Every structure is written in C-alpha cells, then in structure tokens.
Image (cartoon, coloured by chain):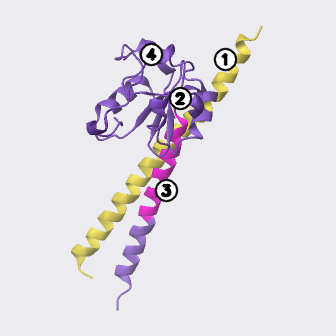
Amino acid sequence: MSLEPMAWVAALALSSSFVVYEGGRRADIDERTALAPKALYKMIGSSQTKLQIVDVRPDPSKNFEDTHVPGALPFPDCDLGKTPAGAKGRIVASIPTIVVSAEGDPKLFQKCAAFFTSARNLDGGLEAWIDANLPEDSGEYIPPKPSAGGGCL
Amino acid sequence: MKKQVRLLYVAATVAIVVAGFAMKSTNDELEGKLAAAPAVDAAATAGSTP
C-alpha cells in the first residue's frame, strides 16, 4: 500500500491547522480592536450577523431614553442590578456583543468584556456614532412581544 | 498515484498554505498596529503633560 495519499492528507491537515490557528488569532485581535461606528452600522444592516448591542451609559432613564443606537439594550455600567427589568432577561452573555459607552471608555469595556463570551467596543462610543450621522433611536426600552420573535438584530 | 490526483493534492495544499500566510501577514500587521497604539497614546499623554 502506498503511503503517498496518507502523506498528502497529513500535509493538508497540517496546512489547514495553520489556517485555523491564524483564524483564531484574528478573532482574538478583533476582540482587542474597537469597532468603528460605520462598521457597526454595516453589521446591523447584515441580517446574517447575529449580535446584540448593549448601551452601558449610566442612568438609562436619562441617557438611553434621550438617544441610543437602534436595537440597543440598556445595560448601565454592565451591572444587571442597575438594568431595567424589561431588558434584564434579554441580555445573553453568549451572543457576540457590541459595547456602547458614552465615549468608548476602554476601562468600562474591559469590565463588560468579562461578562460576555465575545465583545467588541464601539470606537468613540455613542458620541462617535452621532458624529458619523448614523441613525439614532430614543425612548425607553420596550422588550419585543413573544410573538415578534427574537430580540437580536 | 495518478498524476491528476497528485496535482489536485498539490494545488489544494498550496492554496491552503498561501491563504494561511495571507492571514498571518494581515494578523501581524494588525498586531503591529495594536502594539503601536499604546505607545502613541503614551507619547501624546507625555507631550500634553505640563
């Protein structure tokens, strides 16, 4: 029996593991890199991307209700104790998450990143989102009705 | 082993290796930028200190 096919399979497996390793490295880099507002806008527009956006600015009755990224969930200071009751059950740690603070505070992001499996910071926070003239929403958070399907984007 | 099958293995291996090195190059570039960013921030902070 010839060993050549096995050698080629081994070569393919080895080169594939190299690609997988680099893919993992890229995912790690992505987590450490803040996301530009326009890139987030594109992600929201893509129905293939499942993600949740959390607005971590304090005092949601003032900040969140005044303005927020469309579809965002209020999660003040990344503290479930401060989160409005309607949003509390909708925040899922395993869904890829975008953290929106007032100005993209890296320390607050670090705190929030510990809560989620995969999280990225919005570069410049909500201020940069507004400066980029991207759509905003206002009003208190109203959880979707059960018949309306999932709450993710 | 048939010549065509061998060619297929070679092409697949080369394509995967090339893709891997392209990803490695991009990742190295991004990591370089990430590593440089704190240094730039530190320099800017030092420069702005009275």
Element on which disc 1 rests? helix
Highlighted range, magenta: A15-33
- Real-space Cα separation, disc 3 to disc 1, in angstroms: 35 Å
Q: How many residues crowd around disc 2 within 10 Å: few (fewer than 14), some, or many (20 or more)?
A: many
Q: Considering depth in this image, is A95 or B49 the residue closer to the camera? A: A95
At x 50%, y 16%, the residue is A61
Sequence-wise first label, 3 or 4: 3
Residue at numbered disc 1: B44
Q: In the drawing, what numbered circle is on residue A83? A: 2
Sequence-wise first label, 4 or 2: 4
Q: Considering depth in this image, is A95 or A80 the residue closer to the camera? A: A80
**Residue A47 point in image, percent of width and height:** 28, 37
Q: Nearer the viewer, mark 1 or mark 4?
A: 4
Q: Are marks 3 and 4 in contact (CB under 8 Å)?
A: no
**Residue B15 point in image, percent of width and height:** 34, 58
**Disc 2 with disc 1 on a shared chain:** no
Q: Nearer the viewer, mark 2 or mark 1?
A: 2
Tell me which chain appears yellow. B
- Real-space Cα separation, disc 3 to disc 4, in angstroms: 43 Å
Chain at tag 1: B
Residue at numbered disc 3: A21
At x 61%, y 31%, the residue is B36
